[in-house]
Amino acid sequence: MPMIQRTMSLVLAGVLLSGCRGERVPNGSWGADHVVLTVTDNGGRVEFDCAHGTLDHPLRLDDRGRFSVAGTFVPGGGPILAGEEPQSRPARYQGRLDRQKLEFTVTVEGQPAHDPYTVTLGKAPKLTKCV
């Protein structure tokens, strides 16, 4: 293969591969029993039966379809009493996208990771709020 063709092939391969980097979890509502994750351009928010939280950065995927972003986790799902401040804690949200399904875990600072949640794009959540 002549040198110019080899060089052009390498350049084209580099362009194609660089187009794959920076892929993100699609925006929208991802639901399941006991959880809903709303993904936005800037990150997202999550609501559980008895907690909620934020994902503070865009959910960019690596070459294996995984993401890991910092955020917050706030336990409690019922009404907040007057003068009570919610206890927001630093958290890490990690997950993997597989077509229209997303599996993720939440690790609250200083605690073991929660069991994984699997949510589906466009599926209506079924939340049972704590009181």
Image: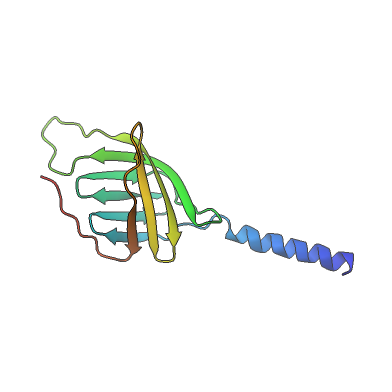
24 and 119: which one is in front? Answer: 119
Tell me the colour scheme of the image.
Answer: rainbow
Compared to residue 68, the image places residue 37 above or below, namely: below
Q: Nearer the viewer, residue 4 or 68?
A: 68
Please state if 65 lies on the left or on the right of 30 as rendered.
Answer: right
Q: Examine the rendered structure and indicate whether residue 84 appears above or below residue 42.
A: above
Picture quadrant of residue 109? top left
Residue 29 visible in the current orientation: no
Number of labels in the image equals: 0
Q: Residue at x 71, y 63 (%)?
A: 13
Residue 83 spot, x, y in % from top left: 13, 29
Question: Which quarter shows the C terminus?
Answer: top left
Let me know if residue 77 appears in the view: yes
Q: Which residue is at the front of the view, 101 or 13?
A: 101
The correct choice, above or below, for 122 with respect to 23 in the image is: below
Residue for point 30% across, 44% down: 53
Looking at the image, which is closer to me, 65 or 84? 65
Left or right: 112 with respect to 81?
right
Classify residue 71 as left or right of residue 79.
right
Residue located at (20% from left, 50% from top): 49
Side of 77 where 115 appears, left or right: right
Rendered-image quadrant of the N terminus: bottom right
Residue 21 placement: quadrant: bottom right
Residue at the image position 72 percent from the left and 65 percent from the top: 12
| Residue 23 x, y percent position in the rendering | 52, 58
Q: Position of residue 82 (x, y in %)?
A: 11, 33
State the image coordinates of residue 37 (x, y, percent, origin top left).
32, 54
Q: Is residue 35 above or below residue 2?
A: above
